[in-house]
Image: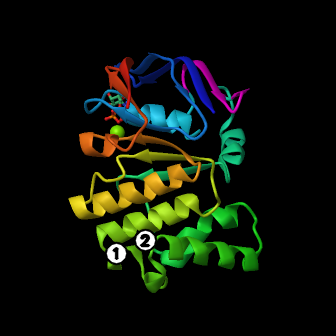
């Protein structure tokens, strides 16, 4: 599903050049659950953003389902992403002005899905994430655990084949963290491919494989 060859990302400002990724070659097979670990600043989020088509690399190749996408324009990336990739972030990234229902509905609106179909799918996703009773609430009125469940509902509402999660339990206590990991694990058992950045050994225990990054390079890969 994912294959990168010598992926490179250099961030340039006036003075400094940061090599965020340096010759990263990885593969993720359909149905796998892969954890990416490594110290702060080693390039984990940069890698995830490129895998998720939120950003382009400055060098190397990226094959997503066999198609080389590393030179795609922003609009090409956006249209390829729709319905294929779901994102979960540490800071939830919900829209404060929209209620739970509306936040979850967003990806379906972007995809141009009909109102009746949207309603059906949003309700199913809310049910699944046990958040239906909060459908009219706004993000600020929810606990962290509830916000992350809304974020996961939004990530899965379009039935993506791939979920990318950047420290999904980073802002949660251990009880809510376990719940979120349980939900991701369940989605993986149903066939969704998951690539997750984490600092937590415990969370990494849910993965089939751990890719360890250091200074923008893959240092080790461990299968579980
Ligand atoms: P991690 O997620 O592992 O903590 P990041 O991928 O966020 O690391 O960052 C990797 C390196 O790239 C860091 O040195 C960071 O400062 C730098 N970096 C990340 N994003 C940008 C950006 N938009 N502009 C400049 N430098 C960046
Ligand atoms: Mg990060």
Give the magenta range. Answer: 57-68
Q: Is residue 199 visible?
A: yes
Evaluate if marks 1 and 2 touch, with contact meaning CB atoms under 8 Å apart. Answer: yes
Spot occupied by residue 111 in the image (x, y as percentages of width and height): 72, 60
Q: Residue at x 66, y 79 (%)?
A: 119
Q: Measure how far apart labels 1 and 2 are at the Cα level.
A: 7 Å
Mark 1 or mark 2, earlier in chain: 2
Spot occupied by residue 196 in the image (x, y as percentages of width and height): 42, 42
Q: Residue at the far left: name it.
A: 173
Say if the magenta span includes residue 61: yes
222 and 98: which is toward the camera: 222
Q: Is residue 98 visible?
A: no
Quadrant containing the C terminus is top left
Q: Secondary structure at mark 2?
A: loop
Is 62 left, or right, of 210 in this rendering?
right
The main secondary structure of the magenta stretch is strand
Q: Secondary structure at mark 1?
A: helix
Q: Which residue is mark 2?
A: 96
């Amino acid at each position: 599903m994912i294959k990168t060859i010598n992926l490179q990302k250099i961030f340039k400002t006036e003075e400094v050049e940061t090599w965020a990724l340096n010759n990263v070659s990885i593969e993720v097979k359909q149905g796998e659950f892969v954890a990416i670990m490594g110290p702060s600043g080693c390039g984990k989020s940069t890698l995830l953003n490129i895998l998720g088509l939120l950003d382009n690399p400055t060098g190397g190749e990226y094959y997503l389902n066999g198609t080389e996408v590393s030179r795609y324009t922003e609009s090409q990336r956006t249209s390829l992403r729709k319905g294929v990739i779901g994102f979960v972030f540490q800071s939830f990234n919900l829209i404060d002005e929209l209620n739970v229902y509306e936040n979850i509905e967003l990806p379906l609106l972007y995809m141009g899905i009909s109102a009746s179909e949207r309603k059906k799918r949003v309700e199913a996703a809310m049910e699944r994430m046990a958040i239906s009773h909060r459908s009219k609430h706004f993000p600020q009125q929810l606990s962290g655990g509830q916000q992350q469940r809304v974020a996961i509902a939004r990530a899965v509402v379009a039935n993506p084949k791939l979920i990318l999660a950047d420290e999904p339990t980073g802002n949660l206590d251990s009880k809510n963290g376990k719940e979120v990991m349980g939900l991701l694990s369940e989605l993986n058992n149903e066939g969704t491919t998951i690539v997750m950045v984490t600092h937590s050994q415990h969370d990494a225990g849910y993965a089939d494989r751990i890719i360890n990054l250091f200074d923008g390079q893959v240092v080790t890969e461990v299968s579980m």
